[in-house]
Image (cartoon, coloured by chain):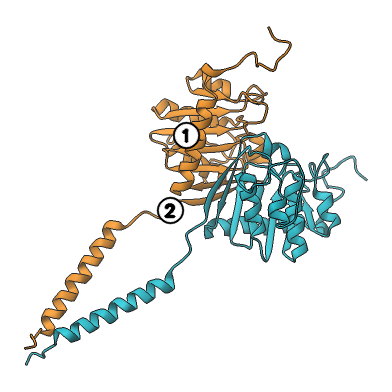
Chain colours: A orange, B cyan
Amino acid sequence: MVPAVSWRRLGAVAAVALGLELVYRFLRRRPPPVREVLFFPAPLVCAEPLLSPGTCCSCPLPHHTDGALSALLRRLLGARRSLELCIFTFSSPPLARTVLLLHGRGVRVRVITDSDYMAAAGSQIGELRKAGVVVRHSQSSGYMHHKFAVVDRSIVITGSMNWTQQAIQTNHENVLVTDDGACVSAYLEEFERLWEEYDPAGYCFFPKDDQNGP
Amino acid sequence: MVPAVSWRRLGAVAAVALGLELVYRFLRRRPPPVREVLFFPAPLVCAEPLLSPGTCCSCPLPHHTDGALSALLRRLLGARRSLELCIFTFSSPPLARTVLLLHGRGVRVRVITDSDYMAAAGSQIGELRKAGVVVRHSQSSGYMHHKFAVVDRSIVITGSMNWTQQAIQTNHENVLVTDDGACVSAYLEEFERLWEEYDPAGYCFFPKDDQNGP
């Protein structure tokens, strides 16, 4: 005997199945991935509208928040918990102000930089240290030439650009921003590796191959 | 009157629907996305096994094809149609050999570099030009500080690393490889913009603001 199924019942089953599929897709929805590429040089703008919104600034620079520098500042200012910086040369005042602002907000900021360039003219590393930001630096002969940042362990900012005024205003540079999980993990792993390698407790002031040392 | 539907017929409809879904998914399948991060310094290896596979090399370097440099060479050697290079300093012999190999295979190679550094000691730009590779260079006061490549208009290779021996063997550097469409388009657009900007037909040998000029 062949059981009979009404079209109405079949329609109800199909409707329920469709409803479940929609609920499943709704629950699985994800925000669009972050994939942004910023190109420099960027026109010089005042960073105050982003760093101190609501305050009045009378400097002669444009006060809009368009352009690559503003986009970079916005990405950094999005940090709520942590900021890892691995920067070869760091002399840009607006970027230093951004880092200090985040440090003041309680974001855990850690900075790795290059030993040769951290004391160069205009370097902001001293200002960061004075404010209590923990900075570690390279100890090897090669340059610590990275220029990347990791925001909240979820977004990586990398590329060719050192954090200097010349790079921002004059050079042709690129900065890639991504939240791709594999990339973020790779950069975080490199940061942690260098952070341990540059631990001051492991400094070697008199290398074994220094024959002139004591 | 309610029409009767047999379970067998219902099963057949479900099977056809499932089959169509599988075919649809099969046709829509895509290779996994390319997301690779290479970190340097990398141990020095001989590039011959990748550049001239099958030939015998007696140099004293290791001849395996592991490591970050080999991974970078492999990505470049994957080019079949085009290679756009935008490199600040280019003095690495194995990377130059790779580019010349691709040029010899008929891959359309275009190079943009920095005017100040292209004639520096060890630069490979002259070798590329001698072999017929088209090179254009910056003409502005700021550095052309990019270090990116686009392979077959589908993969972008970018990061902190100049194509020099020091960068590969000594510095801490990162190179990100991605086939994300939005990123690739952005870098290609930047390349084409600079390619036009640095067109020799537009050279200005006596800038208007040069008051000491004729």
Considering the numbered disc 1 on the image, is that residue within a helix, a strand or a loop? Answer: helix
Residue A10's place in the image compared with A77, above or below, is below
**Looking at the image, can residue A31 be seen?**
yes
Chain for numbered disc 2: A
- Picture coordinates of residue A204, whole percent (x, y): 60, 16
Q: Classify mark 2: residues with Cα within 10 Å, few (<14), some (14-19) or many (20+).
A: few
Indicate the quadrant containing the N terminus of chain B: top left, top right, bottom left or bottom right.
bottom left
Q: Nearer the viewer, residue B177 or A68?
A: B177
Residue under pointer 2: A33
Please give the name of the residue rendered at 52% of the width and 33% of the height, measured from the top-left corner. Answer: A85
- Asked if residue B179 is positioned above or below residue A7 in the image, the reply reads above
Give me the disc on residue A51: 1
Q: Where is residue B49 in the image (x, y as percent from the top left)?
A: 69, 52
Q: In this view, does B121 lie to the left or right of A214?
A: right
Instruction: Please name the residue shown 83% across and 51% down the image.
Output: B127
Q: Amino acid type of disc 2?
A: Pro
- Kindly state the secondary structure of the residue where label 2 is placed: loop
N-terminal of the pair, mark 1 or mark 2, is: 2
Image spot of residue A125 (x, y percent): 57, 24
B44 or A122, which is in the foreground?
B44
- Indicate the quadrant containing the C terminus of chain B: top left, top right, bottom left or bottom right: top right
Amino acid type indicated by mark 1: Leu
Which of these two is toward me, B107 or A169?
B107
Nearer to us in this view, A116 or B5:
B5
Instruction: Find the distance from the CA under tag 1 to the CA under tag 2.
Output: 26 Å
Q: Residue furthest right?
A: B214
What chain letter is assigned to the residue under label 1? A
Q: Position of residue B155 (x, y in %)?
A: 59, 58
Which of the numbered marks, if any, corresponds to residue A208?
none
Quarter occupied by residue A206: top right
The outermost residue toward the bottom is B1
